Amino acid sequence: MTNRAESHIARPVRAIHVNVVGGFSLIELAVVLVILGLIAGGILTGQSLIRSAQLNGITSDLSRYVSATQTFQDRYDDLPGDMSNATDVWGAVHVTPATCALTVGTGMQTCNGDGDRMIEDTSSNPNSNEIFRYWQQLANAGLVEGSFTGVTGPTHAHYASVSGQNVPDTKISKVGISVYHYGDANGTILVNNSPDILFEGTYGNSLLVGLDETGANQGYFLSPAELWSIDKKMDDGRPGTGKIVTYETHTHCHNATASDTVAIANTAEYKLASNLTGCAMLLRGAF
């Protein structure tokens, strides 16, 4: 008779062999590629959303500065920077106008403009630095945020803009917003002793948006498609006509040749197929 205990004697366990294949299977590779695609797509989408927010911020800034200038005019019956009795309100940087124009004051001290409704630099009016006192006086009046020096930057004697110092910055690094009286542009006008850089038309006091350069904010920072999108929303969608324009000499931005005629301005179009960052922008006749 078999002992019951014998039936429970441990038997040897057969080894189980698992074949491990080196590398990834096709399914695993497909999953990895899908994940990488989602990550890349998320990054690109995020960058696009950030850029869109930056550009929307610029258009909001322009509207805000136009509104602030109108409020300033209603309050003081003068344009900021051009205000002829500004020192009566905020004190004088210096009693000598030509020295005042080039000197940084303390607190709210500022300089008088000449009251001619043209916001000019010291090359046009040596006794005032209106294009930079403009921002300082808007801030003095509590109509814009920030603190501004009221004088030109170090790279140009008359109109060197430095974002965040003498002009406001934007959500895009080193892109600022300047103000400048261009007046009327035609085939013979000279701007700052250089050949005309503008499409023909009336500019008056304009807001300039671009990278800081040795002068005003005229540096490229937009692609043609980006500026066209802004122009189409705010204006007529053309680079040489309406309120939103670019510079005639920015030929990476549009298809016009530098000829400065009404016909050129009316027929110029943005180079929408180009991915080059070749555009700066102006809001002409802003106030």
Image: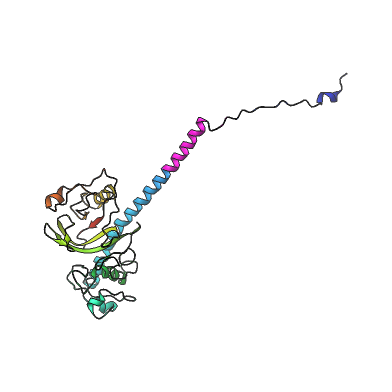
Vertical placement of residue 204 versus 5, above or below: below
| Quarter-of-image position of residue 10 | top right
* As drawn, 239 above or below 69: above
In the rendered image, the quadrant that contains the C terminus is bottom left
* Residue numbers of the magenta segment: 21-40
Residue at image position (44%, 39%) is 37
* Residue 192 in the image, given as x and y percentages of width and height: 19, 64
Question: Residue at the location (33% across, 56% down)?
Answer: 57
The overriding secondary structure of the stretch rendered in magenta is helix
In the rendered image, residue 113, in percent from the top left (x then y), is placed at 21, 73
Residue 96 counted in the magenta span: no
Left or right: residue 148 versus residue 255 is right
Q: Residue at x 23, y 57 (%)?
A: 282
Q: How is the image coloured?
A: rainbow
The quarter of the picture where the N terminus appears is top right
Numbered-mark total: 0
Taking the view exactly as shown, the residue that stands out farthest to the right is 1
Near-viewer residue (44 or 70): 44
Residue placed most toward the observer, 212 or 10:
212
Left or right for 33, reference 62 = right
Q: Is residue 284 left or right of residue 42?
A: left
Residue 215 point in image, percent of width and height? 26, 63
Residue at image point 32% right, 54% down? 56
Is 54 situated above or below 148? above
In reply to whether residue 25 is colored magenta, the answer given is yes
Which one is in front, 109 or 15? 15
Q: Residue furthest top?
A: 1
Which percent across, then down, holds residue 99? Answer: 25, 77
